[in-house]
Amino acid sequence: MSRSVMQPPAVRAGRPLWLAGGTRAARYPRLTGHEDCRVAIVGGGMTGALLAHAFASAGVSTVVVDAASVGAGSTAASAALLLQEPDMGLRQLTRRYGTSAARRIWALSRASVRELTDLVTRLRIPCDLRKRDTVYYAADAAGAALLRREYDARRRAGFAAAWLGPGAFRDLTGLTGGGAIRTRGGAQFDPYAACTGLMAAAVRAGARVFERTKVSSIEAGRHAVTIRTPGGGVTAERVIIATGYATPWLRPLAGRFQMYRTYVLTTEPVPRAQRDDVGLADVLLWNTERPYHYARWTADHRLLLGGSDRLMRPREHRRRQFETATCELRRYFESRLPALASIKTSSAWEGLFALTPDSLPYVGPHRHYPRHWFALGYGGNGMTFSALAARLLLERWHGDVSPDHALFEFGRMRA
């Protein structure tokens, strides 16, 4: 079975803060000639780096190909809030999949943040990793009543959290709101530095990485899969598609995703006195609105603000939409944090992400794609679920398929 490859839409625009210095941790060659391996990974973002490190460290011959450069696509566009909580709340997942499955999904998501931060720490990757509490809030009393039910559900399930009333919430964030859930165990980092550091570790473990290598076609045979590129190709026992979403050459899967553009801006570094005026503590802040808004401080004391997500539409005027969305984003936060009005914006960018109907990724095989595995569709929780995808697919490689795998397979939508 051979599939030709079409070009996907650009995964980011603007200049992310993480790329502002113009430096690179490593540069890998363009593929020329032919490579043989056991596992080939298409995509050199955070998912591809974590997969490459997991498989290479397990002694599996691994090749990574990326159409651009490692970490410089959707990963560099990320705001890198490492949230333990899936985008879909515990109560919603319970209604969809039942109590046991919903609680297990949440437990796996929480464990994945720990696994990722532990790995980055163990490898001593310099990426400004910081542990941070998460504050998930509702803007008004009606929203807070629903959020309180979510809090109660989490507590019944054994997930530790604290409830913040309007006063405690304002003291912590400087915002007016109806209430919030505060959870320990989240984190933040520089996503580009983390990704390139993980890929370098994968190379040290034996992975071979090729940048500026576009995939022209993928042909799955009875005993192997062949990836063809303009300068050569790769033959492997298995290919893992880690492009974040179903690219145009995976047309049969496209209906399982909705593509969104998200927008991020950062301020100039803010002196301590002004940070006190803003009032936001060092937490990962996000709200119950859909699409939601989020904020955090960077390691060099810039305020990072994100949200204003928009469904990607054909023939959209992208530049005009970018300007409108970033202006709306700035106004949104200025209306809630008035001290922000005197602080200048230093950078703004957009990123492309895929959202599935239940906000969970697809990890595993698909019956129409022999010798393919997938790790796609992370919504707003890409960094967290990337770590989980790497673990699940390595388990599958070793034949250790547990009930956890079924929670993230394509077939779960029939449940």
Image: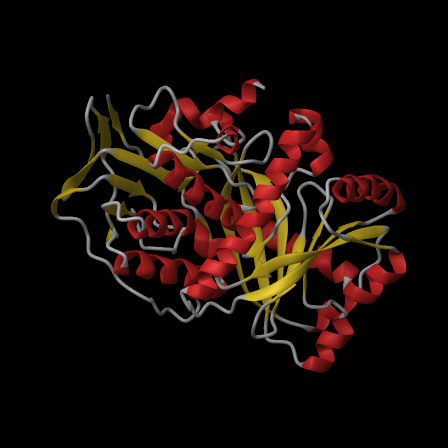
**Rendered location of residue 68, percent (x, y):** 31, 51
Q: Image point 58% across, 68% down: which residue? A: 298
Look at the picture and state if 124 lies above or below 47: below
Look at the picture and state if 126 lies above or below 153: below
**36 or 29: which is nearer to us?**
36
Look at the picture and state if 20 lies above or below 31: below
Quadrant where the image shows the C terminus: top right
Q: Examine the image and state in which quarter residue 270 appears.
A: bottom right
Q: Image point 35% across, 19% down: which residue? A: 368
Q: Examine the image and state in which quarter residue 235 appears.
A: top left
**Rendered location of residue 359, percent (x, y):** 59, 36
**Rendered location of residue 40, percent (x, y):** 26, 41
Q: Image point 34% across, 49% down: which residue? A: 44
**105 or 231: which is nearer to us?**
105
**Rendered location of residue 131, percent (x, y):** 60, 64
Q: Examine the image and state in which quarter residue 10 appears.
A: top left
Q: Is residue 367 left or right of residue 306?
A: left
The answer to whether residue 210 is visible is no
